[in-house]
């Protein structure tokens, strides 16, 4: 293992939350340069990145150190022995913007022996990748950015984050839930409204999120209207 990644063997190493991921071996911790982390999705919501950066900027030095020990990035060791993170993409970009260089990762599996095409198929099978662009279109894995700072902005992913923060739907531990919500908002809320009138877009998003149309989505908190389609048998 290179000097850029240091495995944590101390009894004081922070615990990582791996309960929602399929593991084929015992995970281990390593300290890795943020610039080395590989993304497993094509987009983020840059409004959410900005909000996370602002939250970080308000923290004192001591609190920042605690947060860095707590916010462990789940990752898979992939081709080239690179670290492919499967969560915290928004946080990673925010930390880069704030000048943070190193973070802790919990390595859930070592798939570095696989060929690239097999690696990505395995990642998708395990729900560890999301190869869709800012319009919700499926892309080839060869289009996956190599660095976090190369991720595209998806305004509807930003809207999903804003609506969740406002209580429009419950946070769910399943991977890529906000992208499902982004796809729900995509044909219903214009990019222009999201970019120009964020409050109006969020208010509309809240109404839509609580409607019966969204009842199939994880974290839905609305009520099914009387007489609407449902389990009738």
Image: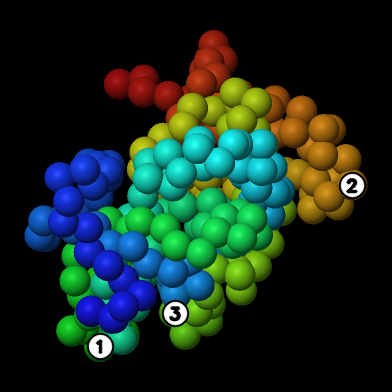
In front: 159, or 59? 59
* Residue occupying the far front of the picture: 62
Mark 2 vs mark 3: which is more N-terminal?
Answer: 3
Asked whether the viewer can see residue 199, the reply is yes
**Side of 187 where 89 appears, left or right:** left
- In this rendering, is residue 203 above or below 19? above
Instruction: Give how far across and how far down residue 19 sits, in percent.
Output: 22, 41
- In this rendering, is residue 180 above or below 102? above
Mark 3 vs mark 1: which is more N-terminal?
Answer: 1
Instruction: Give how far across and how far down residue 91 sits, in percent.
Output: 54, 51
Secondary structure of residue under mark 2: helix
Q: Label 3 near label 2: C-beta < 8 Å?
A: no
| Cα–Cα span, label 2 and label 3 | 32 Å
**Side of 91 where 173 appears, left or right:** left
* Quadrant into which the N terminus falls: bottom left
Circle on res. 196 = 2
Q: Label 1 near label 2: C-beta < 8 Å?
A: no
| Cα–Cα span, label 3 and label 1 | 13 Å
**Which residue is painted at 70% across and 33% down in the image?**
205
Instruction: Give how far across and how far down residue 73 sits, in percent.
Output: 37, 54
Mark 2 vs mark 1: which is more N-terminal?
Answer: 1
In front: 40, or 179? 40
Circle on res. 141 = 3
**Which residue is painted at 54% across and 19% down in the image?**
222
Secondary structure of residue under mark 3: helix
- Mark 3 surroundings: few (<14), some (14-19) or many (≥20) residues within 10 A: some
How many numbered tags mark residues here? Answer: 3
Secondary structure of residue under mark 1: loop
- Corner quadrant of residue 128: bottom left
Report the residue marked by disc 1: 115
């Amino acid at each position: 293992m290179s000097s850029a990644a240091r495995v944590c063997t101390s009894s004081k190493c922070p615990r990582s939350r791996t309960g929602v991921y399929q593991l084929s071996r015992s995970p281990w911790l390593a300290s890795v340069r943020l610039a080395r982390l590989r993304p497993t999705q094509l987009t983020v919501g840059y409004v959410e990145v900005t909000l996370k950066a602002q939250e970080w900027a308000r923290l004192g030095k001591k609190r920042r150190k605690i947060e860095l020990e707590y916010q462990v990035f789940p990752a898979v060791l992939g081709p080239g022995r690179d670290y492919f993170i499967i969560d915290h993409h928004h946080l990673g970009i925010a930390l880069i913007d704030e000048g943070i260089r190193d973070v802790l990762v919990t390595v859930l599996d070592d798939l570095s022996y696989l060929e690239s095409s097999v690696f990505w198929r395995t990642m998708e099978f395990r729900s560890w990748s999301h190869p869709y662009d800012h319009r919700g279109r499926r892309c080839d894995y060869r289009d996956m950015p190599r660095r976090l700072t190369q991720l595209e902005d998806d305004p509807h992913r930003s809207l999903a984050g804003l609506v969740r923060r406002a209580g429009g739907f419950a946070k769910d531990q399943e991977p890529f839930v906000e992208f499902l919500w982004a796809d729900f908002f995509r044909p219903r809320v214009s990019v222009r409204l999201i970019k120009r009138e964020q409050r109006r877009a969020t208010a509309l998003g809240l109404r839509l999120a609580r409607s019966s149309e969204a009842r199939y989505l994880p974290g839905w908190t609305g009520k099914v209207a009387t007489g609407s389609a449902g389990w009738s048998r």
